[in-house]
């Protein structure tokens, strides 16, 4: 029973160790991805000419679309771009921001600058369950009575997280890192935190349960708007982009506008770690988040939006070029890992040898956990492609390249 319980908090695993590192890629370093140990890439998209940011942090994107810069406390990324979409039934939010008093004040202040009261809100659409996107959703619903919608796969994560005893997260992390080959001195602080009861400060333990489901491919029931969900798993299992299938207000060439969440950002590649959980019989199905992410990128490239409105950084054009940049980055990273796997390595040892934007010795504690998660997701992809394999009988488990 305990073994099953330890594995229930899977998607909390690496995500909540937010930190200050990002792997190095070709080109200029982008901003660092919040809460996710992201890769920072050069980016090939062009910043779109949206309206100026006002003193209230509001940007008018035209056509009944605005964004609010809602702060993320103590995080190098700074803020989440919460989008407001006008509909004939009232305004709808796309994401809500981190659950923090300053974030709530900024969100409500930005809405007020648009002449919108929280009680005017008709609904909330969540791109994915992470707390810098879903954190304030419950408070918004409580204040307004609006609905909250999310993809079923991420709703499952929310339900699983709420039902798990909080200390399970520390148990899961300690077990996961030990299996990955982490030294005992790295695992010890997690066990100590568990014993000390420092578990109730983790964000997302009581995230709001959505009352509607976002179904990919279907038009969302938003009066007067044509908004369609595109399932883009990878960063989370239920991540969705939202395609506004309407003429661009500035007549930019392409297919409408895309609210991309964390899936497609102009200068950052999002954290791709493992997400998996046991079924009712306690059997865990191995997932391939990186493969999911790469497939999802190609889906967005085929869509060809005129402009991308991401949840971080800034709007941009050239979605297809940005996708090509990210696909090339991950192909290069996988090739580099195969070279490292000429000798058998644990995921921890592989992460130690991977190229980051600072030496391994300088990477903070929690960031190392995220680095190992990135390494495991890439290993999972190589194994699925038949390019790498686990060494039979190794404990902790080691991997090696399969000769071509």
Image (cartoon, rainbow, N blue to C red):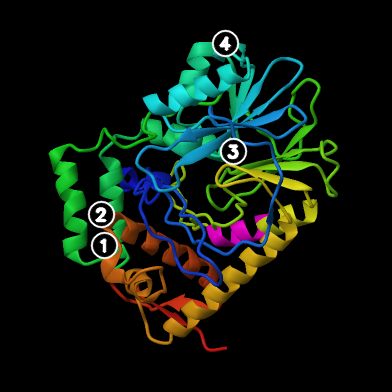
Taken as a whole, is the magenta stretch helix, strand or loop? helix
Q: CA distance from mark 2 to mark 4?
A: 43 Å
Give the residue at mark 2. 174
Magenta residues (range): 289-296
Q: What residue lies at 69% left-to-right and 35% top-to-bottom?
A: 215
Measured Cα–Cα span from mark 2 to mark 1: 6 Å
Front of the two marks 1 and 3: 3
Which sits in the foreground, 230 or 389? 230
Among numbered discs 3 and 4, the one appearing first in the sequence: 4
User: In front of the other: label 2 or label 4?
Assistant: 4
Residue 124 is marked as: none
**Quadrant where the N terminus is found in the figure:** top left
Bin the neighbour count of mark 3 within 10 Å (Cα to Cα): few under 14, some 14-19, many 20 and up.
many
Residue placed most toward the observer, 308 or 168: 308
Q: CA distance from mark 3 to mark 4?
A: 22 Å
Q: Position of residue 397 (x, y in %)?
A: 34, 71
Residue 272 location (% of width, % of height): 50, 57
């Amino acid at each position: 029973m305990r073994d099953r319980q330890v594995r229930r908090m899977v998607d909390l695993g690496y995500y909540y160790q937010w930190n200050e590192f990002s792997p190095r890629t070709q080109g200029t370093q982008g901003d660092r991805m919040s809460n996710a140990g992201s890769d920072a890439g050069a980016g090939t998209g062009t910043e779109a000419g949206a309206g100026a940011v006002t003193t209230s942090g509001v940007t008018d994107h035209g056509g009944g679309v605005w964004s609010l810069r809602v702060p993320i406390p103590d995080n190098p990324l700074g803020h989440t771009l919460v989008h407001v979409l006008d509909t004939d039934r009232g305004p709808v939010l796309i994401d809500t921001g981190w659950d923090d008093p300053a974030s709530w004040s900024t969100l409500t202040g930005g809405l007020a600058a648009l002449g919108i009261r929280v009680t005017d809100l008709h609904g909330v659409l969540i791109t994915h369950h992470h707390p810098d996107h879903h954190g304030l959703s419950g408070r918004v619903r409580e204040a307004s009575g609006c609905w909250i919608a999310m993809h079923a796969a991420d709703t499952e994560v929310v339900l699983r997280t709420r039902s798990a005893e909080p200390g399970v997260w520390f148990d899961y992390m300690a077990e996961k890192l030990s299996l990955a080959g982490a030294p005992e001195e790295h695992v010890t602080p997690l066990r100590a935190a568990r014993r000390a009861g420092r578990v109730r400060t983790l964000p997302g333990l009581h995230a709001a349960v959505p009352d509607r489901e976002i179904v990919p491919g279907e038009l969302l029931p938003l009066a007067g708007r044509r908004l369609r969900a595109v399932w883009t798993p990878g960063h989370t299992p239920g991540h969705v982009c939202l395609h506004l299938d309407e003429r661009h207000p500035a007549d930019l060439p392409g297919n409408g506008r895309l609210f991309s969440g964390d899936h497609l950002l102009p200068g950052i590649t999002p954290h791709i770690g493992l997400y998996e959980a046991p079924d009712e019989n306690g059997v865990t199905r191995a997932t391939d988040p990186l493969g999911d992410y790469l497939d999802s990128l190609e889906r967005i490239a085929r869509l060809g939006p005129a402009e991308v409105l991401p949840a971080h950084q800034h709007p941009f054009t050239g979605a297809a070029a940005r996708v090509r940049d990210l696909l090339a980055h991950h192909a290069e990273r996988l090739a580099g890992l195969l070279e490292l796997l000429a000798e058998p390595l644990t995921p921890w040892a592989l992460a130690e040898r991977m190229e980051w934007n600072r030496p391994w010795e300088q990477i903070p504690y929690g960031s190392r956990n995220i680095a190992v998660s990135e390494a495991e997701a890439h290993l999972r992809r190589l194994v699925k492609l038949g390019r790498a394999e686990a060494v039979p009988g190794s404990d902790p488990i080691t991997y090696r390249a399969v000769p071509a």
